[in-house]
Image: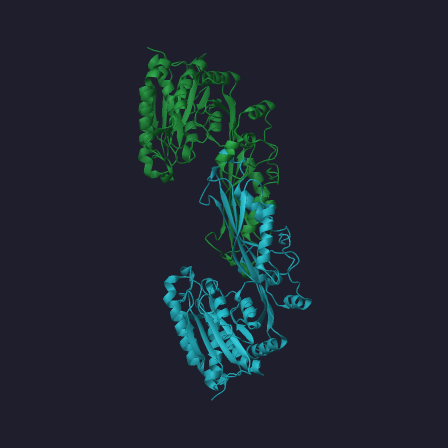
Chain colours: A cyan, B green
């Protein structure tokens, strides 16, 4: 019997090589050619859970299995923590842009380069190792633990909500802990206070039954390309505000504390602009870059297609035009209400001579933290002990729709603490995760159980 | 020696089978795999010119040859007529949509179905047969004749203007006659009073250096798709007028006579809408459909492309967006001036956070008829004699840029009389030309020489 921290010091070199085994399995959930690999990753994870001291099983779903590990030794009087992560990864494409192969992990400049190192195998594995540090050093945890790892996060988690509903009683917990995001900056641990949601549409405009000659018909027949442009342009005011009628009605006005804290963060605006490479930053008038990313909703074109798009000139009057447009939502907007507003806006702004259809492709609710002061304080202490700096509260512009589902179905607050760093290339070539955060993160998560029980 | 009309009556069956030979040669100028066919078509045409009684030669250019036939027997005191046409054709694609194969001419319901039947082999051939009717019946024409057939019209006539400049003295003529367009309606011969020109652009918008995640960056980085939509939308007012500053400054206000004549034409608005298949017709406020097509300029999207255009949802913030936009021009607009106006309009309307580039892809000047009353009267008489109806003056929404070049280089007016019918599928499957117009047209063109000399 030793203490978890001493255990970690001995075990860290093994953890790193073991993580590399995990990262070498190309568990690309989107690609059915990798189905065997995805299943292999699930099996690998189950074995590691059992080695750590959890009772673990691979549970089949309609597509990729869930891996479920449990330790109930703290007893019914102790708190129960549900940890959620995913063992599937994004496709490695474009493969040619990786410095080292996506599934051959390599450390360069203190970073672990591999697909899944940050999103989310690396962070999921850290949780498992923190549990192992307790169970293998002094044989117990101060809390009951459920570790739920899905294999479909990168394809929209189609089977997870049904699974959580079905296993609702077994998954009952006092808190859900998720590490699938990034810290604000190196050395600066962070806790998420919000996630944006999503309402994704395809706007389809149709004019003539077939493409026409722009000379013989142009001027007398409405052009779906022009019509689509005027519809998309009508979605914004000149000052960057979204112009969909009623769009801001449900937007939460965050209290001064949160806005002050966001303003107080040492955000490197110049570095952000350099990384983006645009001529300048732009967005909704009256808000800072971080506010625009975290607490303000958006309406962005994701794709446009009409007529002739090859080289040179073709004098076609297109019969159709299509825009993919999605809104990032903030509390308390809902995808359903935004879809209604979008439909009626588009109907109102559709020019004469064309027909317009709005198709809803995808929706996810925004989230705001429901963590109470006690849990927040416990999480803050464990992060500060390990990283030597108190965590800051941060927002996240992207969406993790399952967070809201967990909270609703399990009636427990979610605590989101991520350890990746900005620019981690989570869905791009050269995904990386810092070795320092890998080690300090495991340490912080090890303290988490003591803090929760304390 | 007989008279030309009697000659025609005997020869018409032979003309039809001879035309079929011509139509069977797949002289697709755009497709280098058909280069031998295109050259074969030129040789075939030269032989027919010589049989008709012209001195003919095939003149090489950088790509497809020009076929030049001449008869100078009327002497220096008589007028000289230059006839222009083209022996190349559009590709037959999509091949599967033809009822009978594109290069196997077939008569159905009084129509000759074949690629090139209307555009322009059929109409070029009619001119040759009218000349033959004179030269082979009474051995002479009342005017000197030059027949110029190019093989590059369908690829933008890249070598024709240099050819006309180089052969300028040899091509000197009192009038240029072109039959490469359509009559207003069946039984209604027509003479063109105008052609629209063209100014074709690609508008390129760039934001970030690479595509970004719409969650992590959306709202704080300008979206090129949204920016492009606002630029394209800014090109029109809500009432359909083009909003480019200064766009209408050079637009000719046609006199009341022309506008009255356009209004007096028995245009079948319902039939036009049915053929187009759009929910309703739409265009510039204050003008009829024919005015919108013939005497008003346009600004049409020909293509749009940005971001993700496949199935379903991808949450990408695109790094770039592109629109192909072209203006149909009317007298006295010029592509050069419209390009200047477009550039400064786009610069003025480019939103913050993106860079914008306007690339000129193609330009062609509009044309208005310069035919004097005498030539117009002569053309009208020959058409009325053959078709039994006086011709109407019509505009054409499309462009034939070479017409303006002919007039400028040769300092001679162009007379445009076409014999195809609306809906001839000139660049589409099932191109057709009416047998009746083939025969009556040859007759009319035969009279033309008498009328010109008389």
Total numbered labels placed on residues in the image: 0
Q: Please say if B274 is above or below B386.
A: below
Q: Residue at x 53, y 37 (%)?
A: A221
Q: Observer-nearest residue: A141 or B27?
A: A141
Q: Observer-nearest residue: B198 or A43?
A: A43
Q: Where residue B25 sits in the image (x, y, percent)?
A: 32, 31
Is there any visible trace of residue A205 in the rendered image?
A: yes
Whether residue B74 sits left or right of residue B361 in the image: it is left
Q: Where residue B202 sits in the image (x, y, percent)?
A: 51, 43
* Residue that sits furthest to the top in the current view: B1
The quarter in which the C terminus of chain B is drawn is: top left
Q: Where residue B59 sits in the image (x, y, percent)?
A: 35, 28
Is there any visible trace of residue A279 in the rendered image?
A: no
Q: Please say if A122 is above or below A76.
A: above
Whether residue B40 sits left or right of residue B359 in the image: it is left
Q: Observer-nearest residue: B353 or A195?
A: A195
Q: Quadrant of residue B240?
A: top right
Q: Residue at x 32, y 39 (%)?
A: B33
Q: Observer-nearest residue: B41 or B408?
A: B41
Q: Where residue B400 sits in the image (x, y, percent)?
A: 47, 30
* Residue that sits furthest to the right in the current view: A256
Q: Quadrant of residue A24?
A: bottom left
Q: Please say if A48 is above or below B57.
A: below
Whether residue A35 sits left or right of residue B206 in the image: it is left
Q: Please say if B446 is above or below B185.
A: above
* Residue that sits furthest to the bottom in the current view: A1
């Amino acid at each position: 019997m030793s203490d978890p921290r001493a255990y970690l010091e001995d075990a860290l070199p093994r953890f790193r090589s073991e993580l590399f085994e995990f990262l070498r399995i190309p568990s690309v959930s989107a690609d059915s050619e990798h189905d065997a690999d995805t299943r292999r990753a699930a099996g690998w994870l189950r074995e590691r859970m059992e080695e750590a001291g959890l009772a673990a099983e691979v549970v089949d779903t309609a597509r990729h299995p869930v891996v479920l590990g449990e330790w109930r030794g703290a007893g019914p009087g102790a708190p129960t923590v549900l940890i959620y992560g995913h063992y599937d990864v994004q496709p490695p494409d474009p493969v040619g842009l990786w410095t080292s192969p996506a599934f051959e992990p390599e450390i360069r400049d203190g970073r672990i380069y591999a697909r899944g190192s940050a999103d989310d195998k690396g962070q999921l594995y850290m949780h498992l190792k923190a549990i192992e540090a307790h169970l293998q050093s002094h044989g117990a945890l101060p809390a009951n633990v459920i570790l739920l790892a899905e294999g479909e996060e990168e394809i929209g988690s189609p089977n997870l909500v049904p699974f959580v509903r079905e296993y609702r009683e077994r998954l009952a917990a006092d808190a859900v802990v998720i590490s699938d995001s990034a810290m604000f900056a190196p050395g600066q641990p962070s806790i998420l206070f919000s996630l944006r949601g999503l309402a994704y549409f395809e706007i389809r405009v149709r004019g003539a039954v077939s493409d026409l000659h722009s000379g013989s018909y142009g001027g007398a027949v409405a052009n779906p390309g022009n019509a689509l442009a005027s519809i998309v342009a009508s979605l914004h005011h000149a000052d960057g505000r979204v112009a969909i009628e009623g769009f801001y009605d449900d937007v939460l006005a965050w209290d001064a504390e949160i806005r002050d804290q966001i303003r107080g963060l040492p955000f490197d605006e110049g570095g952000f602009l350099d990384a983006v490479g645009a001529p300048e930053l732009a967005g909704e008038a009256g808000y800072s870059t971080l506010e625009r990313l975290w607490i303000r909703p958006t309406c962005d074109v994701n794709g446009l297609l009409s007529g002739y798009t090859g080289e040179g000139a073709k004098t076609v009057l297109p019969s159709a035009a299509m825009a993919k447009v999605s809104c990032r939502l903030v509390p308390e907007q809902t995808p359903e209400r935004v879809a209604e507003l979008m439909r009626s806006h588009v109907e109102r702004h559709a020019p004469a001579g064309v027909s317009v259809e709005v198709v809803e492709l995808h929706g996810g609710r925004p989230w705001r933290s429901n963590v109470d002061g006690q849990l927040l304080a416990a999480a803050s202490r464990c992060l500060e002990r390990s990283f030597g700096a108190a965590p800051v509260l941060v927002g996240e512009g992207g969406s993790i729709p399952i967070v809201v589902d967990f909270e609703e179905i399990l009636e427990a607050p979610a605590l989101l603490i991520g350890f990746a760093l900005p620019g981690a290339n989570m869905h791009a070539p050269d995904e990386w995760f810092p070795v320092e955060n890998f080690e300090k993160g495991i340490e912080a998560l090890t303290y988490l159980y003591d803090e929760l029980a304390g």
